[in-house]
Image (cartoon, helix red, strand yellow):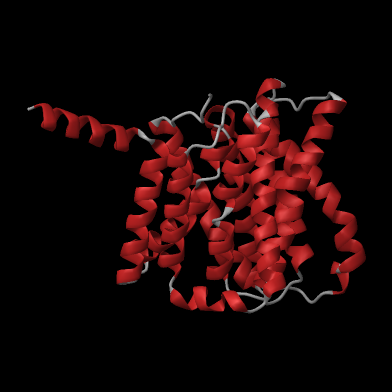
């Protein structure tokens, strides 16, 4: 029975980079929702990302594919990977705290492992991978802390929205595997999906938010929108499709376990924030979960134990 492949050191490095640039999106969104409606935030984020990626492609002399079937796939990918989950998460964060939203978002690997088992031939469910994902999710919950867990009983629809976003991300990761088979490069895939998701959302924004009637946002919110579009979307999806093209969907979805980790570590490194005991425990659980999913540390320990026994 085929199983999901192990990731190389480069793929783990890209996954860590993706967790850093994606981790900032929760912070940026939390600031932006104080002044702007959800659809306006999401659409602005995607439009900025699409413009930046098209400019980069033009400057580097690369061309976008022209086949209608590829653009149809871009549209579906943009719907599942951008328009739906971004809107659900941004709306959810208007009702619940970003910490709880990140915990619910960290269920993505569980959805991905289950869906890939039934929808693919080479990313099958194994007890080790399931146990690793559950350990990682427990680590995220411990990392965020008890206050977020106690909030699980309130704002149920916002929590369902965040879970729906996680499911949509998981299905998008599986669907996105086809772009490699179609011969579409990761950069072109990133550009195509954010372009199509922008076109999908623009009519909704015009009808629902009437952005021309909104007051001009503050400089801080404008800076957050720029960071969301250029860093947490454009750059993030370059990493995303590079990992997806070689490592597979279930490995890619592990990024949702790493996002809270990088947020905590960056705060400790650059903001002199202290790490509480629950955060250290959470980091340990996530490390154990990732080690179980990757498999190599487990096999190394088993091999060492067998050698010790023979000796």
Asked if one can make out residue 135 in the rendered structure from this viewpoint, the answer is yes
Could you say where residue 14 lies in the image, as x and y percent from the top left? 47, 39
Could you say where residue 92 lies in the image, as x and y percent from the top left? 68, 69
Asked if one can make out residue 272 in the rendered structure from this viewpoint, the answer is no
Q: Is residue 213 left or right of residue 155?
A: right
Q: Residue furthest right?
A: 207
Q: Is residue 36 left or right of residue 231?
A: right
Q: How many marks?
A: 0
Residue at 61% from the left image edge and 71% from the top image edge: 30
Could you say where residue 145 lies in the image, as x and y percent from the top left? 43, 72
The image quadrant where one finds the C terminus is top left
Q: Quadrant of residue 117?
A: top right
Q: Is residue 55 above or below residue 204?
A: above
Residue at 80% from the left image edge and 28% from the top image edge: 70
Residue at 41% from the left image edge and 59% from the top image edge: 139
Depth check, front residue: 151 or 85: 151
Q: Is residue 200 left or right of residue 13?
A: right
Q: Residue furthest left?
A: 311
Q: Is residue 204 left or right of residue 260?
A: right
Q: Quadrant of residue 97?
A: bottom right
Q: Is residue 256 above or below residue 191?
A: below
Could you say where residue 156 lies in the image, as x and y percent from the top left? 68, 73
Depth check, front residue: 221 or 116: 116
Q: Quadrant of residue 86?
A: bottom right
């Amino acid at each position: 029975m085929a199983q999901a492949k192990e990731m190389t050191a480069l793929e783990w490095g890209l996954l860590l980079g993706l967790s850093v640039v994606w981790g900032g999106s929760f912070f940026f969104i939390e600031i932006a929702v104080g002044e702007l409606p959800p659809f306006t935030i999401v659409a602005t984020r995607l439009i900025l990302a699409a413009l930046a990626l098209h400019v980069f492609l033009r400057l580097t002399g690369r061309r976008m594919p022209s086949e209608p079937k590829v653009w149809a796939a871009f549209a579906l990918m943009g719907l599942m990977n951008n328009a739906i989950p971004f809107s659900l998460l941004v709306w959810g964060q208007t009702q619940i705290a970003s910490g709880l939203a990140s915990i619910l978002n960290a269920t993505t690997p569980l959805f991905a492992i289950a869906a890939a088992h039934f929808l693919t031939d080479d990313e099958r469910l194994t007890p080790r991978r399931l146990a690793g994902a559950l350990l990682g999710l427990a680590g995220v919950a411990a990392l965020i802390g008890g206050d977020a867990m106690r909030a699980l009983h309130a704002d149920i629809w916002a929590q369902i929205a965040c879970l729906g976003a996680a499911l949509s991300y998981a299905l998008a990761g599986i669907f996105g595997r086809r772009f490699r088979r179609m011969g579409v490069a990761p950069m072109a895939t990133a550009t195509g999906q954010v372009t199509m998701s922008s076109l999908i959302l623009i009519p909704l924004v015009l009808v629902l938010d009437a952005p021309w009637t909104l007051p001009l946002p503050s400089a801080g919110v404008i800076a957050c929108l720029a960071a969301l579009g250029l860093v947490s979307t454009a750059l993030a999806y370059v990493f995303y499709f590079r990992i997806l093209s070689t490592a597979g969907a279930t490995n890619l979805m592990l990024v949702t376990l790493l996002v809270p980790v990088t947020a905590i570590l960056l705060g400790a490194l650059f903001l002199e924030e202290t790490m509480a005991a629950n955060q250290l425990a959470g980091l340990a659980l996530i490390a154990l979960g990732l080690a179980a999913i990757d498999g190599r540390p487990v096999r190394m320990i088993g091999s060492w134990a067998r050698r010790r026994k023979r000796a």
